[in-house]
Image (tube, rainbow, N blue to C red):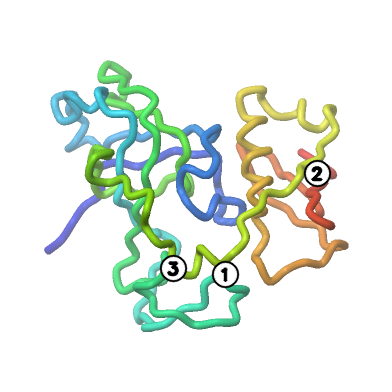
Amino acid sequence: MEIQPIAHIHTDFKEKFGIPRQSGLVEALQASIIFDPPYRVPDAVRGLEEFSHIWLLWEFSQARRENWSPTVRPPRLGGNKRLGVFATRSPFRPNALGLSVVRLLSVDPDAPKGPVLQVSGADLLDGTPIYDIKPYLPYADAHPEAAGGFTDQVARGQLEVRCPDELLSRLPEEKRAALLGVLAQDPRPSYQSDPARVYGMTFAGAEVRFTVEDGTLTIWDIN
């Protein structure tokens, strides 16, 4: 069976570093989903506006490989322990498919390239191909009692983010909360903890440089 993208998502992430590790962690992140011409049909999203969240089935487009491994090293475990690929959300899978749930902010059927979906909380690279969209159903999809496997044993505390107002003002106002939320999630690989290391990431067209020490992330430059 061959499948084709139905849409592409447009986000503030031009590179993988800095993207939240899961969807929904940073609600302030906003993105647009624009359908490809064969699927650019308003009737195809009729009724979707009644749902608050949607599922996105997409491709890890920068993680394509000829071969696959039955085990991977989850970054959350420091890259020191191997688990079965199907027990993780690693992008390096037999089929490089991702699954995310995002908040649906609006459906604009009359946009120039409509229908266009505005969403928040997406954990996708800019330009990621979307293969399917389905409504999130709370009565069937929500399981608060579910066990989280190895992720239940890994601390998920957030960093304190410090940024001078002068630097933050270099970003458009509507992007500032999203950047701070992304950085609070600690974008570093879990095995890196050098307080002297200066990290850089691209966000909303700006290069952001920061260090992390003792649970505090300090932004040194936004350019």
Residue 156, how many percent across, how many down? 61, 56
- Please give left or right for residue 101 compared with residue 151 in the image: left
91 or 153: which is nearer to us? 153
What residue do we see at 45% from left, 42% from top?
122
Residue 127, how many percent across, how many down? 42, 45
Q: Secondary structure at mark 3?
A: helix
What residue do we see at 81% from left, 40% from top?
162
Residue 2 circle label: none
Q: Secondary structure at mark 2?
A: strand
The label nearer to you, 3 versus 2, is: 3
The label nearer to you, 3 versus 1, is: 3
- Asked where in the image residue 69 lies, by quadrant, the reply is bottom left
Residue 149 circle label: 3
Q: CA distance from mark 3 to mark 1?
A: 15 Å
84 or 143: which is nearer to us? 143
Sequence-first disc among 3 and 1: 1
